[in-house]
């Protein structure tokens, strides 16, 4: 049988037998179910054209090197390369989600970017798989580069991750550095590079000041448009936006929102706090630090992740269910401490505790000297509602 006919028959058989993924030179590209393909050209060295909305590649196939139930492996040639490449269709138990595939694609792009940015170093490893034994999340790409006998760790935040993932990046960078230093026997681990999306370094830059002097950590911003890395000095990135707002402006905004916000605060006055934002003319409501609703020009919008649903009589039941979940899961005595509502915005929760009772920080502090704001006209018993 000619190679072209054998290739087409093998592809049809493999695609019809279950879920599979396309890989090139070890890197995953896409699920086979989302790809279209065509075999054309010479019978002895046919062209294989594969395409989808995200991919478009053409390779000249020189041989089928492995065909089993688990994989179909092709030796292929790419224009401009003298060495043959390896194209694989690999059987999988189930298709990965779009988010998982996006992270794996980012991992492959990052390896190329690091090779360009640091040409004197070799990327020895890069993975996006979770390591639950060592508390390493699968939300980040982590790996190690080598130069001589010296190694450098790196951890990167892919684009499109949640705000919690972005905020927790420094924690996982330090966990990864500690893991390598305790487990690597191949050389010295110099430090860790923390790579974040462009214009997202201000929060982590503030936290650098709390690190021990002996921790070697570098901060980089990744410009996706230019496909480049820029090293950031935390001292100049941590405090770019500071301003003072006259107290009368905050109080005037709270007075406008009072009629609609006060009934919500009354649901749990010890847990719910109001926070005016004079720049956008909005009032945020937080449940033990977690933003769950906002007042905007006479309307209330709610939702813990994306506050876009307007609170109307028709969706009152959904709002009440959200409040019940907050009361159950975002509570110091909650039994499910892995629930997203319990784990979200941990520093905001800590901030709310300090706002309510500053003596939690140090018993010598006098809470009478710290201003406690209420909604205008509210009883002083709700003094824990601070802005």
Image: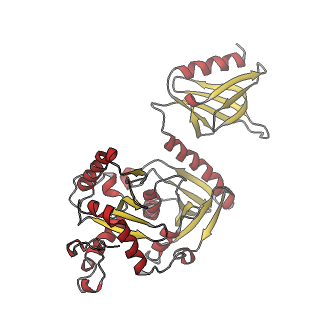
| Residue nearest the viewer, comparing 82 with 95 | 95
Q: How is the image coloured?
A: secondary structure
Side (left or right) of 282 relative to 361: right
Q: Residue placed at 60% from the left, 26% from the top? A: 66
Nearest to the observer: residue 321 or residue 122: 321
Query: Eyeballing the image, is 146 above or below 367?
Result: above
Where does the N terminus fall, quadrant-wise?
top right
Quarter in which the C terminus is drawn: bottom left
Q: Residue 350, image x and y in percent?
A: 32, 69
| x then y, percent, for residue 81 | 77, 40
Q: Point out the residue furthest to the top here.
A: 1
Q: Nearer the viewer, residue 17 or 227?
A: 227
In this view of the protein, can residue 84 be seen by the observer? Answer: yes
Please state if 358 lies on the left or on the right of 303 as rendered. left
Tell me where residue 126 appears, x and y as whole percent: 54, 51
Q: Is residue 114 above or below residue 348?
A: above
Q: Quadrant of residue 64?
A: top right
Q: Is residue 15 above or below residue 352?
A: above
Figure quadrant of residue 341: bottom left
Residue 288 in sight from this viewpoint: no
User: Where is residue 210 drawn, in percent x and y?
Assistant: 43, 76
Identify the image quadrant of residue 357: bottom left
Is 39 drawn above or below residue 336 in the view shown?
above
Number of on-image labels: 0
Relative to the observer, which residue lies in front, 223 or 39? Answer: 223
């Amino acid at each position: 049988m000619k190679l072209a006919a054998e290739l087409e028959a093998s592809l049809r058989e493999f695609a019809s037998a279950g879920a599979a993924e396309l890989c090139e030179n070890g890197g995953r590209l896409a699920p086979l179910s989302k790809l279209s393909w065509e075999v054309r050209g010479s019978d002895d060295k046919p062209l294989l054209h594969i395409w989808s909305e995200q991919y478009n590649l053409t390779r000249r196939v020189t041989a089928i090197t492995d065909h089993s139930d688990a994989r179909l492996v092709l030796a292929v040639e790419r224009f401009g390369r003298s060495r043959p490449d390896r194209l694989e269709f690999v059987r999988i138990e189930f298709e990965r989600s779009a988010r998982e595939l996006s992270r794996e694609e980012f991992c492959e792009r990052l390896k190329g970017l690091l090779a360009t940015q640091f040409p004197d170093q070799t990327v020895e490893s890069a993975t996006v798989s979770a390591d639950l034994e060592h508390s390493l999340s699968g939300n980040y790409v982590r790996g190690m580069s080598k130069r001589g006998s010296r190694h450098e760790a790196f951890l990167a935040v892919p684009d499109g991750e949640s705000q919690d993932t972005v905020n927790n990046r420094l924690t996982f960078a330090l966990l990864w550095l500690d893991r390598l230093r305790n487990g690597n026997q191949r050389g010295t681990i110099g430090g860790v590079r923390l790579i974040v999306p462009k214009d997202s370094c201000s929060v982590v830059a503030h936290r650098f000041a709390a690190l021990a002097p002996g921790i070697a950590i570098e901060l980089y911003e990744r410009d996706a448009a230019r496909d480049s890395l820029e090293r950031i000095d935390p001292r100049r990135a941590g405090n770019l936006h500071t301003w003072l707002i006259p107290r009368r402006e905050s109080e005037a905004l709270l007075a406008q929102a009072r009629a609609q916000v006060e009934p919500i605060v009354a649901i749990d006055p010890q847990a719910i706090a109001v926070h005016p934002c004079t720049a956008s003319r909005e009032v945020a409501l937080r449940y033990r630090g977690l933003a769950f609703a906002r007042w905007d020009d006479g309307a209330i919008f709610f939702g813990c992740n994306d506050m876009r649903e307007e609170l109307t009589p028709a969706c009152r039941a959904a709002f009440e269910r959200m409040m019940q979940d907050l009361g159950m899961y975002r509570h110091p005595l909650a039994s499910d401490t892995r629930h997203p509502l319990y784990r979200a915005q941990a520093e905001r929760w800590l901030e709310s505790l300090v706002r309510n009772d500053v003596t939690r920080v140090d018993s010598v502090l006098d809470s009478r000297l710290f201003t406690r704001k209420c909604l205008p006209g509210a009883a002083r018993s709700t003094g824990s509602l601070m802005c």
